Amino acid sequence: MLSRTLLLMTLIPALLMTSSAARGADITVEGAPADTGFNIGSVATIRASVKGLGSDPSRYSAFAEIQYAGTTSTTSVQMDRMADSKPGQAEYEIGWPIPGQAPTGLYTVAVSVQDRTTRRTVAQQSLRPFVAYKKLVQISHLSLDKTFYTVGEPLECELTLENLTDAELDNLTVEFSNSNYPWIALYSAEAGGNPDLALKVMRDHLKLPARGTATIPMMRAGVAAFLQGKQKEVMGSGLPERHDKTPPPEVDNYTVAVWNSDHTVLYDMKFTDYAIVRPWDQELPIPYSRDFTHPYNSDIDFQKYRHFYAPGQLSPFITVDHSRTLYRPGDQVKIVCTLKNSAEEPWQGANFRAAILDAAGKAVQKTAVRSGISLAPGETLAVDSDAWAIPSNQAPGTYRVRLELAGEGGRTLAETTTEIAINTLPTSLMIINPHEDDEAAYGGLIRAAVEAGIPVRAVILTGGDVGECERYYNKPCGPNEARGFGLVRMEESREAYEHLGLGRDKVDILGLPDGGSGAIWSQHIEVSNPFLSVYLAVDHSPYEHVLKPNLPYARDAVISTLQQLITDFHPAMIVLPHPDERHVDHRTTNWFAIKACQGLLREHRIDPQTIIWGDKAYGAGGFKPAPYKYEKVVVYLSGEAAALKQEMSWLYQSQDGNLDEGMKKTFSELSRQEEHVRIVDWQEHEGWNE
């Protein structure tokens, strides 16, 4: 009997342990790919740590399940168990050779743990995905001959190129320019050509052997010139205001780009370190670069920030709730505020009244908000009262609201002013922009729609992966850095929209390549021939949290996606960049969206009365202008809405938000208007840009 009892005491824990292990109740999996992305043809390393395996980890196997996002086909690879595993857990690793013909883009990874004895899967865990990219040529070294230049002095540059492929590359062209993005036209219709921003061909017909390198030794690449303000002639609003006012010396950097012989494929692009350009007779002061908030410490205003509101705009007695300051004709204006008796004497029978004044100071409405107010010193009273039913024919504009608390005999006890703005708004609004920060041009309109409770949907086409990537990391950007920088910019834009009151769930991002929209529009139309991005080194959207991971970089795919978004949302108004902007991503965003609308119009899937706006153009470059007719439109802002828009710009820290914050305007200085154009005949002129 005793032997049977001992036998049961021995078997029961073992059976329980086996049952628990088979169920995988206590087995956990952690891990990740060794990097965020890998070049096609290289090995993608995936690591996992499996815990809770009991006394015999050798009875378990781990498998990495690798899948191209958006497909159903899975590659299952058994992982190697590492020798340094600890008791009760096992460390696994696998190096997956990425096939040379594998598609570029996002790959998901899951690790499953199998009990060899029962042949059952006892645990499974999704890991962070990785990206397979295809980088062909890399500028592995780039340097200027020195840091300090006198204006007119030659600039010399050296660089090393690396061929990352197994094939020889021939007829490459290497260009040097003064801090220019190749997809922004150097020609301005307003300013004409700009020789200081001209390109210099450092080498053409260059040959790179398979897996080999080529070095261009130190050579003359340009001439030191004062560029501040001159880039703005080309880039429009792409540079902060301080670039117009900063006197020399100045801090500049330069661009080197590698192209194929016919200038249709941009293989790589890098920016030099900063250089200081100064006059012959001046050495100081040396300005701070754009990494810093102010070019000179003398630009720091120690008083202005203390006085955002002018005297009289704030009152210790009347605190106004500014959550609603933008209205439509037909809306009801409410006065929401808190009255506080901060005086030493009580208030008896006071009257609170409001007057609404137009731009000329004429009262368009006078209202007795509340009467018979009695408050002892220190007491408060919350006010929430209708003040004006805006007539349906009321002219749009910015209006001043004067609030006054009058005591017995009409004596003024307290007063303050605030502002409202009136605009005619659509019943629904869709914003389609190329980059994360371009929505700022429509910040006032977006805020007006949010305050009115109008449905709003935002669409951003690119991931913004290039603009200031090197500045963010303080080193050259490869595909992994560029993709990570795109995530930074996406988050900045979501936060900026949230600052205007639009939730991030209302923002869709496609993840197209920064600077690639022109090639996608003109050269990569079908999904079978997607565009290979220079920085991301992929031809499909490599981001996990975008509208469609692995969206092909092809015109048909972009237009189809926009058509789906438009038909799902049914916007009464769509706002876009101008069709003639010099930045190729800006003008082609307009082209993509209007072509999508024209296609829907042919199929009777969009209202022909849909309103389309374009942002005020910074001027066309040296290319064919759009044939549309335009009407100027203005969005009016209250001072509080203008302040929100200013604050919004600070959130784009990767895009000079620090400089915008350093140049903050006071309440009185903020513009109360946004100027745009209505594209009157968007329904016509189909195919003009093809």
Image: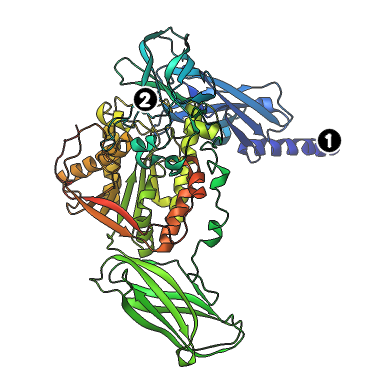
Q: Is residue 248 above or below residue 213?
A: below
Please tell me whether mark 2 sits on a helix, a strand or a loop.
loop
Q: Is residue 49 above or below residue 336?
A: above
Q: Which residue is mark 2?
A: 532
Q: Position of residue 157 (x, y in %)?
A: 48, 17
| Residue type marked 2 | Leu
Q: Position of residue 118 (x, y in %)?
A: 60, 30
Please tell me whether mark 1 sits on a helix, a strand or a loop.
helix
Q: Which residue is drawn at the image coordinates 19% and 31% (left, top)?
A: 690
Q: Which residue is drawn at the image coordinates 30% and 74% (left, top)?
A: 390
Number of disc labels: 2
Of the 4 image quadrants, the one containing the N terminus is top right
Q: Which badge, 2 or 1, is on the more N-terminal residue?
A: 1
Judged from this view, the residue extending furthest toward the right is 2
In-image side of 79 versus 226 (left or right) = right
Q: Which residue is mark 1?
A: 3
| Residue type marked 1 | Ser
